[in-house]
Amino acid sequence: MPYYGFGYGFGIDPAYLLLVIASTVLGLAAQGYIDRTYRVWSRVASDGASGADVARRMLDANGCGQVGIVRVAGRLTDHYDPRDNNLHLSSDNMSGGSVASVAVACHEAGHAVQRAQGFAMMRVRAALVPVVNFTQGTWMIVFMLGVFMNISGLTALAIALFAFSVVFQLVTLPVEIDASRRAVAYIEASGMSEKQVRGARKVLTAAALTYVAAALTSIMQLLYLFSRTNGDER
């Protein structure tokens, strides 16, 4: 039976352990940075308006008056859902009047503006969602079957299915970066101080790093799977 380094065969592959450690460090570092940055700028007041207020103004200024704003439970659970065309803002960012809350709310408003303006990468990402929802739930099952049944075709199929997740992560990056760019541009144009604009940029840059970390982790895992499969075939 081929050895793929997941604890089967004679032991744990050191390369896989290194991948797990690197992925964990990346994830924790990115999450720690966004938590620290958000905490710092959540103590700095904006221009007096709440995150929801500024996001509403940004939406209206970009012809997105039909987009709603609703409250969602949790912390930093904010997102734009194109299915109901609503910004879902956590309590802190909906009602809070800090630089951080405004930055996050306007970032989500940026996604709504992307959709309204037909931003190409957002359309690609939306098209990938149902595919990735399927592949994320099946690739590991197919991979395990390939390992235990010693069928190289199944392991190759599993890696191809996982590759869709990597593509999705890569497509997500420009979508998130563009939404942050739109948010910072609006915050700056709305007349907030240079300090507030700088703070918003820092918060959104920190948030973007979480997507970069996720993409790097997925790429490393895909490369590992390729290397193990190619090594076992030689």
Image: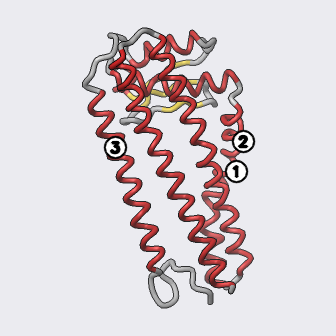
Q: Position of residue 199 (x, y in %)?
A: 35, 26
Quadrant in which residue 115 is drawn: top right
Q: Tell me how far mark 2 sits from mark 3, CA to CA.
A: 31 Å
Q: Position of residue 220 (x, y in %)?
A: 53, 63
The residue under label 2 is 127
Q: Amino acid at mark 1?
A: Val
Label drawn at residue 131: 1
Q: Amino acid at mark 2?
A: Ala
Height in image: 229 above or below 77?
below
Instruction: Tell me the residue at 61%/22% (across/down).
Output: 113
Look at the numbered disc 3 and give the secondary structure of its residue. helix
Could you tell me if the residues under marks 1 and 2 are in contact, i.e. CB atoms within 8 Å?
yes
Q: Earlier in the sequence, mark 2 or mark 3?
A: 3
Number of the front mark, 2 or 3: 3
Q: Tell me how far mark 1 sits from mark 3, CA to CA.
A: 31 Å
Height in image: 161 above or below 172?
below
Count how many numbered circles sit on residues in the image. 3
Instruction: Tell me the residue at 61%/15% (across/down).
Output: 64
Whether residue 223 sits left or right of residue 208 in the image: it is: right
Q: Quadrant where the C terminus lies?
A: bottom right
Query: How busy is the neighbourhood of tag 2: few (under 14 within 10 Å), some, or many (20 plus)?
Result: few
Label drawn at residue 33: 3
